[in-house]
Amino acid sequence: MATLTVRNLDDDLVRKLRIRAAEHGRSAEAEHREILRQALGGEPVKPSRAEVAQRLAAFQRDIGSRTAGSSAELLAQAREERTQRLTGGGSGS
């Protein structure tokens, strides 16, 4: 494995990197590796708890007060909506 040294980083950037590492439960060095891996098209990264919470909150806002049916009903509805979007209307049957 190679070693990479980065000099002359802004103090604020270093602070943000350390905070981000702590939020992800990693060491600063592990977080730096992960950032580079993401930036250069490596393996996908698990979202942080905060990101998951934000996505869940957005999803809950999107569905509003709708009640969920069975998974089969939800899948059928999703397929129907997708078919309508792709065909410009009409049913997928």
Image: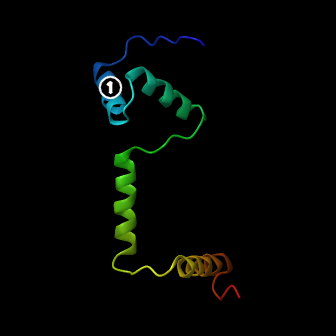
Q: Residues within 10 Å of mark 1 (few under 14, many from 20)?
A: some
Q: How many marks?
A: 1
In this rendering, the answer to whether 7 lies above or below 37 is above
Secondary structure of residue under mark 1: helix
**Residue 29, percent from left and from top:** 43, 20
Residue assigned mark 1: 18
**Residue 36, percent from left and from top:** 52, 27
In this rendering, the answer to whether 74 lies above or below 45 is below
**Residue 77 found in image quarter:** bottom right
Residue, x 66% and y 75% (percent of image)?
Answer: 86
Colour convention of the picture: rainbow
**Residue 27, percent from left and from top:** 38, 24
In this rendering, the answer to whether 91 lies above or below 27 is below
Which quadrant, please, contains the N terminus? top right
The front one of 7 and 58 is 58
- In-image side of 85 versus 5 (left or right): right
Which quadrant, please, contains the C terminus? bottom right
**Residue 50, percent from left and from top:** 34, 47
Residue type of the residue flagged with mark 1 = Arg
Residue, x 66% and y 88% (percent of image)?
Answer: 91
In this rendering, the answer to whether 26 lies above or below 81 is above
Residue, x 53% and y 76% (percent of image)?
Answer: 71
Residue furthest right in the image:
93
